[in-house]
Image (tube, rainbow, N blue to C red):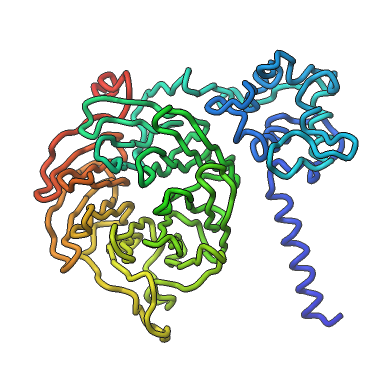
Amino acid sequence: MSRPYGYLFVWLGLLLLANREARPGRADDKPATGPVSFYKQVRPIFQENCQGCHQPAKAGGGFVITHVARILKGGESGDPGVVPGKPDEGALLSQITPEDGKPPVMPKDRTPLSAAQIALVRRWIEEGAHDDTPAAANVLVDMDHPPVYTAPPVLTSLRFSPDGGLLAVSGYHEVLLYKADGSELVARLVGLSERIESAVFSPDGKWLAVTGGSPCRMGEVQIWNLQSRELAVSHPVTYDTVYGASWSGDGKLVAFGCSDNSVRVIEARSGKQVLFQGAHADLVVGTVFSTKDTHLVSISRDGSMKLIEVATQRFIDNITSITPSLLKGGLMALARDPSKDELLAGGADGVPEIYKMFRTQARQIGDDFNLIRKFDALPGRVFAVCYNADGSRIAAAGSLDGHGEARVYQAGDGKLVSRFELANCGLYAIGYRPDGKVLAVGGFDGTVRLIDPETGKPIREFLAVPGNAAKIASK
């Protein structure tokens, strides 16, 4: 073996070893000796394979697998899920273990657990099914035990419903649904994810797609039925928060970006993954479908905007320039013109830009051919962008040194329409009401501000915290 190839194989071996060490919850990567830790070893297995259907917000068969006490209790059958020290007497192990060559009952419609994972769960039960979950991570938060706020949450997402009647506001462990004018809290959609990164209404307004997770532990996509206020789908994915949800125009697919640099698409009704693309070199924070749903666009902290063909999952093109000197830091925000395939993006350089989605001439070195228009730079970074319903206005929100600013421009010629500034609050979320008469902005202080987009003047503001909002506001 020549020396260069020898170095290559050594490097690949080290890389594979590092990847194995970096994968939490893989039972076959753990030593066979020593007490089994529920929190470090068993919980990640359940998180990856089971909690999509067995969690407080979506307890299939009445069985919840996110807390040891609920696992021991079991489900609607009345049988205990686990009997400490007696693995063959509880229902859990029999459900995940193959029998007589037949696949196990659970996880339903998913890849069965490996033999090593099943053995690890058995050992945990044999050793007494001890709960070593840290107290801070063992707090129960669900629809019956909603979050109690001691400080307002940082707002990362604001979206109006298609009919303009509701405003979805990101919270802690939940999405808060307010009447569009902020006068009344209509519903609290409480789920597993501690951090909410995006909450987006389906085109028909009947569903809400939510992305988020618990940093460094889990990512999750939630699909909520807004009529019943029930969680229809929980799709656990990766071991960190996920970002930038978007719906296909027909309401059948939901796309999102991940911290593992991937772009993914799932079926909204089943949670089945139908697209995976790993062309980005950094965290993916935004996605949007083309007008005909044939293509998907994603943005990343790597500074690029990429075009993907949905049917084949193929990377097609870099929409932005790939010339290093033209990349001004990561992209943070993405929106599509409601009626055509033009894209509004913003990021680290503070400059909102409109690009056409599809290239009509061959790429040339150093070109930025798809760029249609640049707008005046906001101070600091752009964290959120949006179009109004007819595409005649664009809005962008950003932050610099704790100060926030939102601006509205004419999309056609780049003329500044209005400006809204906050001296001590960075702005991270923005959304146009469908009638174009109200713009919602929010950020660090947890206050939703409704402003007139044509003048930049405030219309109304409210603290996006239920129950104890007045107490927090008075501090």
- Residue 10 lies, in percent from the top left, at 79, 68
Work out which residue is located at the far top of the displayed protein and give it.
Answer: 78
- Quadrant containing the C terminus is top left
Q: In front here: 378 or 417?
A: 417
Tell me the quarter of the picture where residue 438 sits: top left
Q: Is residue 9 above or below residue 14?
A: below
For the point 58% across and 54% down, the residue is 274
Furthest residue in direction right, as rendered: 100
Looking at the image, which is closer to me, 453 or 366?
A: 453
Q: Quadrant of residue 5?
A: bottom right
Is residue 175 shown above or below 216?
above
State which quarter of the image contains the N terminus: bottom right
Residue 333: where, in percent of width, then height? Answer: 36, 56
- Picture coordinates of residue 315, whole percent (x, y): 53, 69
Side of 279 relative to 19 (left or right): left
Figure label count: 0
Q: In terms of depth relative to the viewer, which is nearer, 106 or 65?
A: 106
| Residue drawn at x 31%, y 41% as measured from the top left | 158
Image point (47%, 18%), residue name: 145
| Quarter of the rendering containing residue 27 | top right
Measured as percent of width and height from the top left, residue 462 is found at 23, 30
Q: Does 406 sit above or below residue 298?
A: above
Left or right side of 470 for 95: right
Q: Nearer the viewer, residue 439 or 35?
A: 439
Q: Residue at x 39, y 77 (%)?
A: 359
